[in-house]
Image (tube, rainbow, N blue to C red):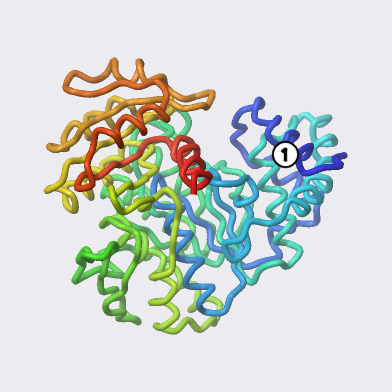
Amino acid sequence: MFNTYEEALEWIHGRLVLGMKPGLKRMEWMMAKLGHPERRFKSIHVAGTNGKGSTVTYLRSVLEEAGQVVGTFTSPYITVFNERISVNGEPISNEEILRLANLVYPLVIELESTPLGGPSEFEIVNTMMFLYFGEGHADIVIVEVGLGGLVDSTNVVTPVVSVITTIGLDHMHILGHTLPEIAAQKAGIIKPGVPVVTGKIGKEALTVIQEIAEENDSSLIQLNQDYFISKWKTLPTWGEQFTFEDDFICLRQATISMLGEHQVENAALALEALRVYSHETGLAISHEAMLRGLKKAFWPGRMEKINDEPLIIMDGAHNEPAMRRLVDTLKQDFNQQEIYLIFASLEDKAVVEMLKLLEELPNCHLIVTSFDYPRAASAQSIASHLSGDYQIQEKWQHALVETLNEMDNSGVLVITGSLYFISEVRHYFLDEE
């Protein structure tokens, strides 16, 4: 057992060496031992390749405005470990992490002696989350899938509504090498009779989701078929404005403070999921609450403005689909400005494909770098895939200082790539402040 938060955290992170352990048997065993805490609260379950974090944020923000106490389970964390389990956006305390770890520890020891073997770090954190929210600390819990869906350890939950944001090529060594294979994994969160709302998903992947929804007798609600976005425009002040519409609601001049067309799609997806949730539960959510919630929603490291002059933006575009969205947004909103872009990635990501997209930017000065993480790609290995003009700087701190010295106030600095990289740089900026 643990006496301090630090000891508990060291134990939790120590489970990382066990790697990923797909399958639900260990989670089901632990949930049964704990008397099924995952069945004691209302939830929304969110899967998808990209857009999960932002969608969770829009959902939380609107529900808070509607007077709900909202629990969230998200990963990876950007600032502190505790934020993975949060209530109304506030990470739970160190004392709670310590208490929950001590409650789960004896179970882990017992599970290790069974043929199932010991749980992974993610399974332990999941169990702590289910235990905590099973105690009644929130009116509703928004549960973000860790990886995939079908065999993800969050998938022991039966939500009021399931959400699938986007389907793209990522984590292919685990989820499959084609969009239909990946879609089948993500659609694994669909439960019998539970409605599912989807975001912008291509035909190939959508066909798989439609089949799985049909098998489960789940109603499927789709973007551009059941709910719609119109009158979208980028605001000069920072953010987007659009009209949202389905058969029940017309929400005009909805404003979000996150940049990019994909963020408009995430916000619309959240609104439709909430419309379904309120229909299923009887919770009244006013148009005013929706508009206020959308406007207040903030998700660190997603087109986040860190500084005004010069403009510094951070965006965790950590895979090919996310990088495509970033490049499209930069082309649309900053085509008149010089863009300085600092990029770092994990080794197991689609580095070649991401770099190809970055090379599309006509006015871009590319700086490749690395950061302090076991799976981080070196700047040299990233550079080996480049042919055009670029700079290479192994330490991102040096890259940052050199770039800021080189550019003037009319330029834009974009820091992008791995979410772990974004987290590290963000710490630096916040600590500086």
The answer to whether residue 17 is above or below residue 326 is: above
Q: Residue at x 42, y 76 (%)?
A: 292
Q: Is residue 27 left or right of residue 325?
A: right
Residue 395 % position (x, y):
42, 24
Q: Residue at x 44, y 84 (%)?
A: 286
Find numbered disc 1 in the image and state the secondary structure of the residue it sits on.
helix
Residue 376 % position (x, y):
46, 25
The amino acid pointed to by label 1 is Leu
Determine which quarter of the picture holds residue 19.
Answer: top right
Packing grade of label 1 (10 A; few <14, some 14-19, many >=20) is: some
Q: Nearer the viewer, residue 307 or 253?
A: 307
Q: Residue at x 60, y 46 (%)?
A: 80
Determine which quarter of the picture holds residue 381.
Answer: top left
Q: Nearer the viewer, residue 186 or 381?
A: 381
Q: Is residue 358 left or right of residue 382?
A: left
Q: Is residue 59 left or right of residue 363?
A: right
Number of disc labels: 1
- Of the 4 image quadrants, the one containing the N terminus is top right
Q: Residue at x 46, y 44 (%)?
A: 429
What residue is pinned by disc 1? Answer: 9
Residue 233 % position (x, y):
20, 66
Residue 310 % position (x, y):
28, 47
Determine which quarter of the picture holds residue 25.
Answer: top right
The answer to whether residue 13 is above or below residue 214 is: above
